[in-house]
Image (cartoon, rainbow, N blue to C red):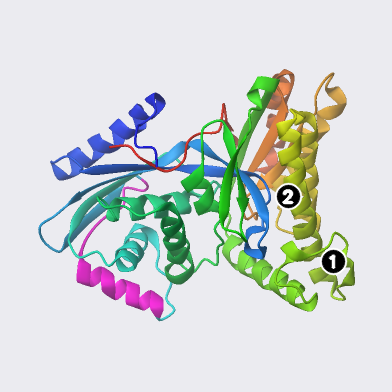
Amino acid sequence: MNNAPRPEELGPAHHAMQAFVRQYRRHPEVLFRAPGRVNCIGDHTDYQGGWSLPIALTLATHVALAWRADDQVRAGSDLGNAKFSSTLSELAQSARRAAGGTALEGLSGFIAAAVDLLAVDRGFDLWVTSDLPVGSGLSSSAALSLGLLSALSSPSGLPQPELIRLAQAMENRYLGVNSGILDQTAIAYARADHAVFIDAQAGTASPIPFDFAAAGYRLWIIDTRTPRSLAHSAYDRRVAETRQASQDLGLPNLRAAAADDWQRLADPVLCKRARHVITENQRVWQTVELAASGRWDRVASLLTNSHRSLRDDFEVSTPALDAVVDLVDGLNPLLSEGFAGARLTGAGFGGSVIALFPGSAETRLRSALGDVAAALPGPPAIIPIARPEDGLRQAK
């Protein structure tokens, strides 16, 4: 990890340290920054050994920590003004309940999981600040997991592969989320001005140049403000369905499938699930090649194709997400140059859309978004992405 903070991070880092001082009347010993991530393309492929292409965001979670000489744990966050006091033994009891099948919740649940996984043997004071919107598909939980694990393993630290493994274990074993490694890997390995080409089967992450701005393109996250209330249960069903599809095809996973193998499945639902994963893997490779040659118009069209697959074959979209994607796609007849494309990002069932479009379309798109506001709980939040950012790092 690169330990030097970027200039634009001094604001959030300073805010996190000041919040810690106000709460505990002393300075933190370490401060870690774990950014959110947005997956540009390649959703629901990681747990089938496939490929994906995320970038890190400016929005991030900061975790500040100072060790204590006793077994007391004091922790809190500016998210919902969450605060609690506990002991290491009480947190261990919480972790044992998770082992018995009771999923942990809230900040205390995350901390109990991290303490158990790392076998933490001394108390600490900890404070979390974040400007990442929760439930928007931007990996706020993975950012929190990695930030906590990094702070609680200091000062010795852990290598990135081990941090990723433990962060996944936090969600799988303690928090009741059957996640893959896409989010954690993206956050751990992200580099400024690059996307992360993730090979889930090999467990590798390679940076590739992703300079859409140089070609006059803009990238937005459009948060529909719709909660992802069904995402966890639906995610688990999709994991099970794709696993069954690969078994029925006699394959170790759908990454190993040929382009038309989905046609061999008798079950129509499994057929659709497999078709999405197989074609999404193809779209990831195409995006890598097109980004390298500066064909951002073609990349934008692949985003829209990806959304249609997630909507029709994987069935993880919502009317609100579809409305935003259709609005972006509907701009294309009005554009004199370039192409606008969009897709849902993350697990689906609410959350955010990622949109890639020529800069000349920005005014039209801002105006048109007002037309879909009636279908949403409130006006959509627009998060411009000026550039891909660096990933997990120690900020103090």
Q: Tell me what residue is drawn at x 35 percent, y 57 percent.
A: 107
User: Depth-wise, is mark 2 or mark 1 nearer the camera?
Assistant: 1
Residue 30 visible: yes
Which quarter of the rendering shows the N terminus? Answer: top left
Classify residue 248 by image quadrant. Answer: bottom right
Residue 319: which numbered mark, if any?
2
Which quarter of the rendering shows the C terminus? Answer: top left
Range of magenta residues: 79-99
Counting from the top left corner in percent of width and height, residue 96 is at 33, 77
Residue 262: which numbered mark, if any?
1
Q: Tell me what residue is drawn at x 42 percent, y 62 percent.
A: 166
Kind of residue at disc 2: Pro
Counting other residues with Cα less than 10 Å from the Cα at mark 2, is it few (<14), some (14-19), or many (20 or more)?
few
Task: Give the distance between the C-alpha atoms of the residues marked 2 and 1, in whole angstroms.
Answer: 27 Å
Q: Is residue 252 above or below residue 77?
A: below
Q: Is residue 137 above or below residue 252?
A: above
Q: Quick check: 117 left or right of 161? A: left
Residue at disc 2, secondary structure: helix
